[in-house]
């Protein structure tokens, strides 16, 4: 599972809430793009902002081995 989505759901935030708190507009794209792909054109500043809000390291946001969880 995509780590941004995983940690966002664990934090109880919607995509819109996370965008607003991080001051960005790319959570949807981050959640639907493999962060290790060359096609991922998401700035390091956006990853830094997300990691700050979610309280995890930027490296943690690049993980792809997290279990799937269901958004409630």
Image: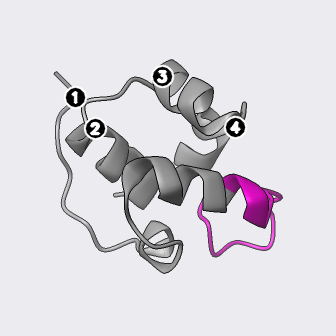
* Lateral position of residue 2 relative to residue 40, left or right: left
Of residues 33 and 16, the one drawn nearer to the viewer in this rendering: 16
Q: Earlier in the sequence, mark 1 or mark 3?
A: 3
CB-based contact (under 8 Å), mark 4 and mark 1: no
As helix, strand or loop, the secondary structure at mark 3 comes to helix
Q: Earlier in the sequence, mark 4 or mark 1?
A: 4
Image quadrant in which the C terminus is located = top left
Q: Quadrant of residue 26?
A: top right
Of residues 10 and 33, the one drawn nearer to the viewer in this rendering: 10
- The residue at which mark 1 appears reads as 71
Q: Earlier in the sequence, mark 3 or mark 2?
A: 2
Q: Earlier in the sequence, mark 4 or mark 2?
A: 2
- The residue at which mark 2 appears reads as 9
CB-based contact (under 8 Å), mark 1 and mark 3: no
Residue 56: say if magenta.
no
As helix, strand or loop, the secondary structure at mark 2 comes to helix
Q: Is residue 38 above or below residue 23?
A: below
Disc ID at residue 15: none
In three-dimensional space, the C-alpha distance between marks 1 and 3, rounded to whole angstroms, equals 14 Å
Q: Position of residue 21 (x, y in %)?
A: 55, 31
Of residues 1 and 3, the one drawn nearer to the viewer in this rendering: 3
- The residue at which mark 3 appears reads as 17
Q: Point out the stretch of residues depicted in magenta.
A: 33-46
Q: How is the image coloured?
A: one colour
- The residue at which mark 4 appears reads as 26
In three-dimensional space, the C-alpha distance between marks 3 and 4, rounded to whole angstroms, equals 12 Å
Q: Of discs 2 and 1, which sits in the foreground?
A: 2
Which residue is at the far bottom? 59
In three-dimensional space, the C-alpha distance between marks 4 and 2, rounded to whole angstroms, equals 16 Å
Q: Position of residue 34 (x, y in %)?
A: 59, 63
Q: Of discs 3 and 2, which sits in the foreground?
A: 3
Q: Position of residue 53 (x, y in %)?
A: 46, 47
């Amino acid at each position: 599972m995509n780590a941004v989505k995983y940690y966002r759901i664990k934090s109880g935030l919607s995509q819109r809430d996370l965008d607003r708190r991080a001051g960005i507009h790319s959570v949807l794209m981050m959640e639907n793009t493999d962060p290790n792909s060359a096609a991922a054109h998401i700035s390091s500043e956006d990853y830094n902002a997300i990691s700050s809000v979610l309280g995890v390291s930027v490296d943690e946001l690049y993980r792809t081995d997290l279990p799937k969880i269901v958004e409630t």
